[in-house]
Amino acid sequence: MSTLEQARAVAASVVDPELPMLTLHDLGVLREVALDDDGAVVVAITPTYSGCPAMATMRDDLVRTLRDAGFGDARVRVTLDPAWTTDWITPEGRAALTEAGISPPGPAPRREESVTLQLAPTRRSVRCPRCGADDVALTSEFGSTACKAMYRCRACLEPFDHVKEI
Amino acid sequence: MAEVHTHEADDHDSAYAGLLVNDAHWAFGTDFEDPLAGVDTTVPEGVDAQELAAYCLQLGDDALILSQRLSEWCSRAPDLEEDIALANIALDLLGQARLLLARAAAADPSLVPALPEGSPVPPEDALAFFRSDREFRNVCLVELPNGDFAETICRVLVFSTYRLALFQRLTAHPDAVLRAVAVKGLKELAYHRDFAGRWFLTLARGTEESRRRLEAALAQVWAYRHELGDDQDAEVVLEQVLATSGVAAPGVRPVSTVGGHTEHLSRLLAEMQVVARAHPMGLW
C-alpha cells in the first residue's frame, strides 16, 4: 500500500462525532486525501450544514488519528463547493444508520424541487428502523441535530430520528 | 476558557472541576477553527473587494442578528418540538453568518476591528463581538424583539422567503465563496420558510384568537418588508402563503428606517457581546 493509500485508509476510518456509527467516509464529508509537496497529508472535508458544530471535532479527530498512525504532518482544509448532499452517504453508512435506529435519507430533491414552497407536511417514504413498519408520523422537521427530523412509528410506537434529504 | 485551567481533574468539591483540563471532555473542542480554512478567498477579477466585503457583511449581519433573536426562544417555545425547530433555524443562520463574516473579513481586512496584540479572536468573531451598534449593517426587521409566537413565525416567513429568493440569484455570483454559501444556505432556508409557512397556515385556520394575533403580527412585520427590497420572486411566494391561508396582505405604511437602527439592536448586542468584550484575550 502506498503512503497515500495508507493515509486515505486512516482518514476514512475516523468516525463522525454526532453519528459515531458512521465514518466520515460513510457520511460523505471526507472529500479528498492528498499529499502536498512536502509530504504532509492534506485532508479536505465539507460541512453537512452551514452551522454544523462538529467541524472542529472532525478536524481534531482527523489530525489526531493520522498522527497516531505515523502521519505527524497532517492538516485539514474545508471545501464548500460542491455542497454536501445526503446522496453522498454510502450504502454501508445507510445500513449502519438503520442498525442504530436512525432512518436513512431517501434521494435528495433536485434544487428546483427543494426550494418550491411546501405548505403540506413533507411526504417521504420512511420506514421505522426498529420494526420496519411504514405507518409512521412526522413529529417535527427539526430534531436533535441540524440534519435530522423526528418521527414516531404508529405500529411499535417508538420515536425515531430520520436523516433529512438535502 | 484557557485562563481557568487550574483545577485538578480529581477535585470532587466542584462540579466543574476537571471540565477544562482535557479537551476530550468537550463535545466540540475548545479552540477556534477557521470556517474558510484552505478555501481560496482571492477576490475574482472584475469584482470590487470592498463592495463584496460590505455586501457580505450586510448579509452576515442580518443572519447573525436574527439568529441571536431566535435563540431567545430556547427553553421558552410553546412546546419542545418548536423549541428545537427554532434553535435549529438559529443555528443554521449562525453558520451562514459565520461564513459570510469570514468572507467579508478575507475580502477587506480593514473592516475587522483592532484587538489587543496576541488576541486569539478570529476575524469573524471580531466583527460579531467588537463592533458597535452603529457599525452593524442588518435590516431593522431582524433586530425587533420576538413578540409572541405569531410575530416570530411571520418574521421567519418573510425573512426566509426573501433570503431564499436572493440566494437563488447569488448562486450565479462571480465570487465562488459567496456562491458556495448561497448554494448551501438555499436548502436550509427552504426548511425555515416551509416551517414558518406551515405554522402561518395553522395559526390562520386555528381559533379566532390565533388568527387575530397572526394578522396583528403580520401587520407589524409587513411594515418593515420594504427593507428587503423589491423582489418579485419572494412576493409571489408570500402571496401564495396568504392566499392559501385566506389572510389579506396588510395595508400598512412602511416604517421609516432611515435612522439606521432601533434601540433594540443596542440591547441585543449588549447581551450578545458582553462576555467576549470582557475577555478579548480569551480562548473558548
Image (tube, rainbow, N blue to C red):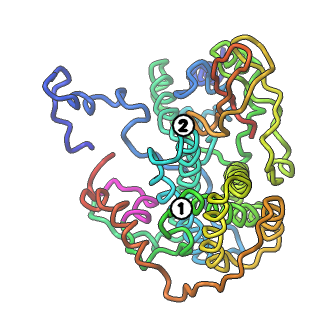
- The quadrant of the picture occupied by the N terminus of chain B is top left
Q: Is residue B122 magenta?
A: yes
Tell whether B75 sits left or right of B92.
left
Disc 1 crowd rating (10 Å Cα; few below 14, some 14-19, many 20+) is: many
Residue most extreme to the front: B208
User: Does any portion of residue B185 appear in the rendered image?
Assistant: no
**Residue A159 position by quadrant:** top right
Q: Quadrant of the C terminus of chain B?
A: top left
Q: Residue at x 42, y 58 (%)?
A: B125
Secondary structure, mark 2, is: loop
Check disc 1 and report its element: helix, strand or loop: helix
For residue B106, side relative to residue A108 (left or right):
left
Q: Would residue A160 be found to the left or right of residue A132 on screen?
A: left
- Residue drawn where x is 25% and y is 30% of the image: B21
CA gap between label 1 and label 2 equals: 44 Å
The residue closer to the viewer here, B170 or B13, is B13
Q: Position of residue A60 (x, y in %)?
A: 46, 32
- Can residue B281 be seen in this snapshot? yes
Say whether residue A16 is left or right of residue B76.
right
* Residue that carries the numbered disc 1 in the rendered image: B66
Task: Count residues near mark 2 (Cα–Cα under 10 Å), then give few for <14, some for 14-19, many for 20+.
Answer: few
Give the answer, above or below, for where A105 lies relative to B140: above
Q: Which residue type does callout 1 highlight?
A: Leu
* Residue appearing at x 47%, y 58% in the figure: B68
Q: Foreground: A32 or B12?
A: B12
Residue type at mark 2 is Asp
State yes or no: residue B114 in magenta: no
Which range is magenta?
B118-129
Chain on which label 1 sits: B
Q: Determine which residue is flagged by label 2.
A: A38
